[in-house]
């Protein structure tokens, strides 16, 4: 059974710091991996989608990497800003069934202090 | 485009009451999903649909029913609400089931007393 784990559960950093969020998954049979951002009381916004054949994706100050063989992904945020404060969720699109469903981690709550 | 919208935003129910949550998408997506989010558990799939007129069970379907009579709408029903169904419910849609991202609605907060 695919399981997704995110470490740390919570992180507080001063503004301007570079930081890394970690995601691990137990089964390498995935189509892709996504990073989402969730603001309090809001829905999920997709940040980056990495297909299983890719190693990384970049969008602005965000860079996500994928090492399928080791079951790991990292989300790198450069020059963090208070507006980056949110919960970051990792999800893998697993093989199997009609939906090839998304399996989510429990998230990392990030606080960027001004 | 409005994307994915959910109605209502918040609801309080008494145990045993019924209600329907409505999800609508204007992106012409085939696939639609209902998730629930609980503290410490991540998002879990309740039911999903691979097209108009189809529904299927996800990871935690008990106590819920769904219908997809129109392509753009996906309804989640609670026939007899229980306190264990207190949660935040998210609807999502996607164009396909493998490669592309899912787009999420803003969520419905449900409290069952």
Image (cartoon, coloured by chain):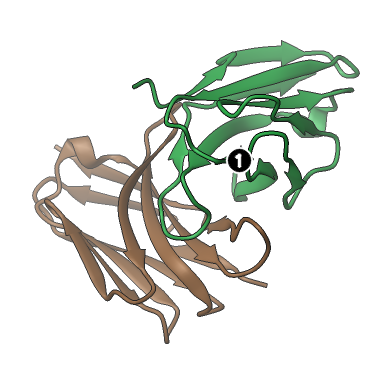
For the residue pair B97 and B87, the one nearer the viewer reads as: B97
* Camera-side residue of B97 and B65: B97
Q: Is residue B64 above or below residue A63?
A: above
Q: Quadrant of residue A81?
A: top left
Residue beneath disc 1 = B33
Determine which quarter of the picture holds residue A40: top left
| SS class, disc 1 | strand
Q: Residues within 10 Å of mark 1 (few under 14, many from 20)?
A: many
Residue at the image position 61 percent from the left and 31 percent from the top: B89
Q: Which chain is brown?
A: A
- Left or right placement of residue A90 versus residue B21 in this view: left
Q: Colour of chain B?
A: green
Q: Residue B27 in the image: state x and y as whole percent.
A: 42, 31
Q: Nearer the viewer, residue B6 or B29?
A: B29
Query: Who's the residue at 81% across and 25% down the image?
Result: B78
Residue located at (85% from left, 35% from top)? B63
The x, y position of residue A58, in whole percent, is 17, 60
Instruction: Pick the quarter of the image with the N terminus of chain A.
Output: bottom right
């Amino acid at each position: 059974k695919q399981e997704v784990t995110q470490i740390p559960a919570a992180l507080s950093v001063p503004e301007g710091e570079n930081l890394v969020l970690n995601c691990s998954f137990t089964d390498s049979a995935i189509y892709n991996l996504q990073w989402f951002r969730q603001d309090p009381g809001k829905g999920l916004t997709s940040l980056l989608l990495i297909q299983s054949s890719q190693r990384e994706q970049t969008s602005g100050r965000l860079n996500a990497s994928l090492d399928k063989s080791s079951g790991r992904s990292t989300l790198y945020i450069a020059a963090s800003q208070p507006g980056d404060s949110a919960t970051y969720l990792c999800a893998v699109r697993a093989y199997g069934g009609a939906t090839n469903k998304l399996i989510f981690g429990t998230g990392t709550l990030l606080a960027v202090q001004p | 485009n409005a994307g994915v919208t959910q109605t209502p935003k918040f609801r309080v129910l008494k145990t045993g009451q019924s209600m329907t949550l409505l999800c609508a998408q204007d992106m012409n997506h085939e696939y639609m999903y209902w998730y629930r989010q609980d503290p410490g558990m991540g998002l879990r799939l309740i039911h999903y649909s691979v097209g108009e007129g189809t529904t299927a069970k996800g990871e935690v379907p008990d106590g819920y029913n769904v219908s997809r009579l129109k392509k753009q709408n996906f309804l989640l029903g609670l026939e007899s609400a229980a306190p264990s169904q207190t949660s935040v419910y998210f609807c999502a849609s996607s164009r396909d089931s493998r490669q592309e991202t899912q787009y999420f609605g803003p969520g419905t907060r449900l409290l069952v007393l």
